[in-house]
Each structure stands twice: as structure tokens, then as C-alpha cells.
Image: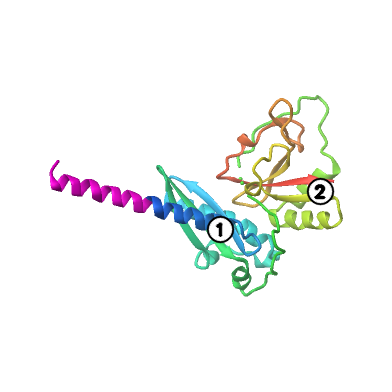
Amino acid sequence: MSRNVISIIAAIFCVTSVIAQNKTTLLQRINEIKSQNEFYFWDQYTHPNADTAKIGATKRLLLDVNSNRSDDAQLSVEEVMPHASYINIDRGNLKQYFVYLKKTDAIAIGGGSATLPVANTPVVGVPINTPAVTPSSQRPFVPDAFVQRIMDTKYFVRVCKLLRSLQTQGQILQFGKLKDVEDYSSLDLILFDMQSQQIVTMLSPVTATGSRTNVVNGSEDSLDNYPTNMTAAIWYIKK
């Protein structure tokens, strides 16, 4: 084997090793941020287009940030992006953006009209394609009072505030984002449209048949019917 060929092989090996080391370092940094929920807002999004992935991650982050702000102090993607930090990791043909923002920095954006969230304050993560469903019974399905109250609250930020209030009153044990739990098959879900931040529907835990029940209209449903690039979800546990 010629000296030039050996040099080329050695160079390729070195570059590959550096890339692997850099990726490991980035993943370590991401895991470090994720473990500090009391200090950071964070989220992530993957898409074939890098710009879409970055904006998608920011929109998801905003769901957390805005849940702690009053209705007249809601922040936009454009306001948050200059203050947020991004980590980009290629995953094959897909681009993944991890975004994070110090909670103390979030207060200052837009005039500092927000309050510092309580450590580990849960909220979401997922968003819309409401399937056409029809109750199997001939009699109209009527959701229970809790479901009606949540649906009437309508918007993501207001629902989060309501759930916090109900948690304080002991009516809700816990609630949070899908990304904060490994298995949410046993949890009730509230789904929101990522764009409008309005409620799409509410789903029961997974039943014995492997599906969920749509507790708004009583039909069989599934989380798979709601694409993750369009919807956000909150899980909750009632007392």
C-alpha cells in the first residue's frame, strides 16, 4: 500500500473519530441541560429541513415559556430565538435541533412581565389532524364535567394554569409533558394544536384493546391520529 493511500486512510479515520467525539460531547451537554429542569426551559424537534427543525424546536419551547406568562405577555418565536441556545445534531438524513433557554433569561424577554416558574413545573410537549369519529352509540355522548371544563378553557396557557390550580386543590395529582415520562400509555392526555394553541381533543389511557378512548366524543381513538409535528400534549393524573 502506498504512503499516500495510508495517509488518506489515516486522515479519514481521524476525521471520523473527531466527529464521533464531538457528537458524544453534544449529547452529554444535552443530557446535562435536561437534568436541570429547575434552571432551563428546553425542547427538541427533528425534521429533514434544518430551518424547520430549528423553528419547530423553538415553538415547542414557547409552549413552556408562555405557560408562565400572562395572556398579554405571550412571547413569539422571533422574540425568543435571539436569546435561546441551539444544539444541532444530524441523525442520518434528518436534522435535530435541541433548544434551551435559562428560566431567569426568559423573564427578561419582553419586558420581564413573567414570573419565575416553580422548579420542575410540568407542562408539555406534541400537535393536528382531528380524525372524523362517530360515537358507536345512538345516544349522544356527553363528556363528564371535568372534560367539559378543560375543553371550555380552550387555550394551552389557560389549561396549564387551571391544572396548576386543580393540583393545589388536590383534584389533580400530577401533570406534565410527554417528554418527561418514558411511558405515557397509562396516562390521560390533552392534545393541542401547535399553531393556534387551542385544544384539539382529550384521550383516555390506552385500553386493553390497545387503543384510547376519545373522552370528548366517546369514540375509539389513538395518539397516532395526531401527528407530532402539528400537536402538543399534556398528560395528567386525576385524584
Q: Is residue 148 magenta?
A: no
Q: Quarter of the image containing the N terminus?
A: top left
Mark 2 belongs to which amino acid?
Arg
For residue 105, above or below residue 177: below
Q: Is residue 157 left or right of residue 41?
A: right
The one nearer the camera, 238 or 226, is 238
3 in magenta: yes
Q: Do labels 2 and 1 touch, CB within 8 Å?
A: no
- Which residue occupies 63% across, 56% down? 63
Labels 2 and 1: the sequence-earlier one: 1
Q: Which residue range is magenta in the image? A: 1-19
In the foreground, 224 or 149: 224
- Whether residue 3 sits left or right of residue 142 in the image: it is left
Question: Is 171 situated left or right of 233 in this image?
Answer: right
Q: CA–CA distance between discs 2 and 1?
A: 38 Å
The picture places residue 132, in percent across and down from the top left corner, at 66, 32
Determine the residue positioned at 83% across, 54% down.
Answer: 166
Which numbered tag is attached to residue 141?
Answer: none
Categorize mark 2 by other alpha carbons within 10 Å: few (<14), some (14-19), many (20+).
few
- What SS does tag 2 mark? helix
- Could you say where residue 205 lies in the image, as x and y percent from the top left? 73, 36
Identify the residue at image location x=62%, y=52%.
196
Residue matched to label 2: 149
Nearest the eye: 138 or 33: 33
Q: Residue furthest bottom?
A: 111
Foreground: disc 2 or disc 1:
1
**Residue bearing the label numbered 1:** 32
Pointer 1 local density, CA inside 10 Å: few below 14, some 14–19, many at least 20: few
Question: In this rendering, is residue 135 above or below 117?
Answer: above
- Residue 214 placement (x, y as % from top left): 73, 35
Amino acid, disc 1: Glu
